[in-house]
Every structure is written in structure tokens, then in C-alpha cells.
Image (spheres, helix red, strand yellow):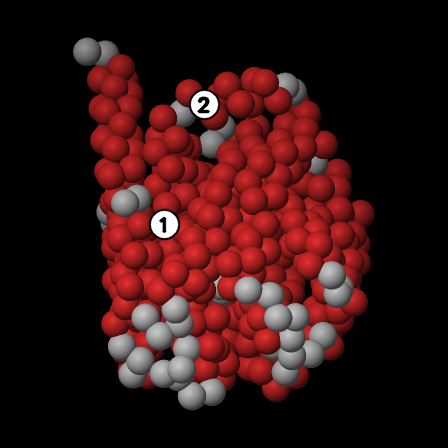
Amino acid sequence: MRALLERTHPIVLTIVAGTLLTRAAFFMTIPFLAIYLYEVKGISPGIIGLVIGTSALTGTLGGFIGGYLSDRIGRFPVMLTAIFVWSAVFAGYAFADALWHFFLLNALSGLCRSWFEPISRALLADVTTKENRLSVFNARYFAINVGAAIGPVIGTHLGTSTSTSGFLITSAFYAAYAVTVLLLMKRYQRTLTSGEDKKFSVKAAISVLAQDRVLLFFLLGNIVVMMGQAQMDSTLAQYLGSAPQFKDGVKLFSYLILVNAITVLILQYPVTNFMRRFDTMFSLRVGSIAFSLALFGFGLSNEWHVLVISMILLTIGEIIVFVMSDVLLDNLAPEHMRGTYFGAMSLRSIGFSAGPWIGGMLLEAYGFANGFYIFGTLALISLSGLPMFHLGQRVMGKSNSTKETINSGV
């Protein structure tokens, strides 16, 4: 372990450790936001879906802009802006009262996340050799889920679904992380290069992305799959918290999030080590199927063991989709456009935006007592991403065959 730490860049250690702490604070509050809005503010499920979805909507194009700026002016300035504003947003949740306050705060939160997430992954790739990047992406995702294991339990004890103190604590964590990143920037920014040696316009960046057909099918498939994944923090939270067939559903929901995190801790490395032997697009198809089975399971029964099995399946899908997506993008991206490519992945936020709204409409249409129809419909929607990943795999295969033909001189 000591030798591993000595080989690891301080930026990697800081980002992974900071991710763990800030995500613990994040999961202490955000998963309970839908319940808080419903029980405390009296907002309808459909409107709550729109509020939750707003963060994903603003992140849709925000990630591309943030990624492009990080290629042009450097990773640190854009990251710092996102983290400081994010800290202010969480403080704002504690004092928000009107509905438009929550729309605005969620919009800003989505924008900050769409800047921070891809840029941090691009920065990790910048300071890590190619053969070690899967391990680093794994470590980052592992840290996210350790935070996810800690956060909901703390949030439950703080009563985040009915109190605002958790939002202030989260704000303080993000402010502390921002100061740490600022110190890191002062020490290492000069040793890192951005895209300044290969300047390119926004139009040129869009042109490159638009011509990458593998990226296109990857994004389309991810948009659909993320519609399913987005249900956990919105539809599932409201369903378990309000459905008459569940006693103390809020606590049950917090324990399911804990199951999600523990499953990652146990299965992440075995699953990714197994899936790395397959084509990345094939792996994404497997992840999509796991998502769909999980959603179907949530509506199939109100027995706790069925819900736990479903959460484990959802977690396996998350592991595959999130980690292998980073690997795929790293392989596709030209080095000087790494931030732009990772930023383009924020377009899948269309799914995160539409998913909670669709789930909210299904809750209103079928009622909280009819989970089978609600989650059965969501499972079918998630499955519709499979053809996109299949087409992406075919295009990638043809592209690789062409390159081999050229290289062999045929």
C-alpha cells in the first residue's frame, strides 16, 4: 500500500479523498430532497419530478461547456468555480422557501455537477498513465460509494427529510474541499497542460463530436439507461416513503441506499475486472439489462428481500455503466480534447432530467399502491437503450477493422 501511494500523484489522492468526503455530505441530503419537498413543502409528485429533473436539464449542455473551457484554460479554474458555487447552493437549500427557489437551486446544482464531474475525471486521466486509468476510475467510483454508504445513515439520524441542518453541513464540506483544491492548484497548475497548445473553437469541438458515430450511439444509449437510473433518488424515494404497503418507508429507503453502497464496496472490483475482458459497448448492454431487471423488481413485490435483490442488480448495472463509460470515453478522446469528450457525456443528463418527471407522472397516473405498473413501464423504457449500444459496437468494430487493414498495408 505504501508503494502504491508513493506512485500515485497527489492530485489523484486529493480528488479521491475529497470525493469520498463530499459525496458522504451529498448523499446525506440530496436523496431525501424529494421526500422533504413532498412532506414538508407539500409539493405534488409531478412537480417534484420537474424540480429534481431541473438539475439534470441544466447539466445537459453545461458539461460540454465546462469540459471545453477546461481544455482551453485548464482544469483547476473551472473546477474551483464549480465547487465554490456548489457550496453556496447547498447553503441556499437550508433557507429556500418558494417553489422557484428550489428550481433555481437545483438548476445551479446540476450546472456545478456537470462541470465538476467530467473535469475531475479528465484531470485524473491527465496525471495517470493509460494502463492505470481503469484502476483510478475504479478508485474514484469506489470513493463515491463509500460516501454513499455513510451519507444516508447520517442523513436519517439528522432527519434530513424534515430538517435543513444537513444542507448546511454539506455546504461546509464542499467549502473545505474547495479550499483544498485551491491549495493544490497553486502547487501543480504549472506542471499540467491544457489544450492551449492545440487551441480549437467551440464550433470545431462540436464538429469533432458530431462526426464521432461511436460517441453518438453511446450517448443515445446512455440517455435512455439514465432515465432508469434516475428513478432511485426521485420515484423510488417517493414510492417507498408514501406507498401504503410500506411501514417506515423512509428508513427502508435509506437502508436500500446503504445496500447500494455496500454492494459497490464488495462487487465493484470483481465486476469491473470480469467485464474488462469484453467490448465496452457489450458491457454497457449488460449494465442496461441489469438496470431494467432492477426496476421491474422494485415494482414486483413489497417484500424487503425482493427490494434488496433489486437494489443489488441496480448497483451491478451502475458499476458496469459508470466505470466502463469512463474507459470508453478515455479511449475515444483525442488527448487535447479529453475534457470536451468527458463533458459531452453530460448530454446523458437528458435522461436524468426526463426520468424523474416520467416517474412522477407515472406515480400520479397509477397511484402509490401500483408499483408493478409504474416500475414495469420504467423497466421497458430502460431496455430501449440496448439497440443503441449494439449499433455503437458495430460501428466500433468496423472502425477497428479499417484501422487494421490500413496498418497491414492491404
Under mark 1, the amino acid is Val
Q: Is residue 112 left or right of residue 286?
A: right
Q: Which residue is mark 2?
A: 210
Q: Residue furthest left?
A: 410
Tell me where residue 306 sits by quadrant: bottom left
Q: Residue furthest top?
A: 410
Q: Is residue 39 left or right of residue 81?
A: left
- Residue 394 percent location from the top left of the image: 23, 31
Under mark 2, the amino acid is Ala
Q: Secondary structure at mark 2?
A: helix
At x 80%, y 47%, the residue is 186
Depth check: give the residue in front, 181 or 5. Answer: 181
- Residue 345 percent location from the top left of the image: 49, 40
Depth check: give the residue in front, 254 or 203. Answer: 254
- Per the model, the C-alpha gap separating discs 2 and 1 is 21 Å
Q: Secondary structure at mark 1?
A: helix
- Residue 317 percent location from the top left of the image: 33, 59
At x 73%, y 77%, the residue is 165
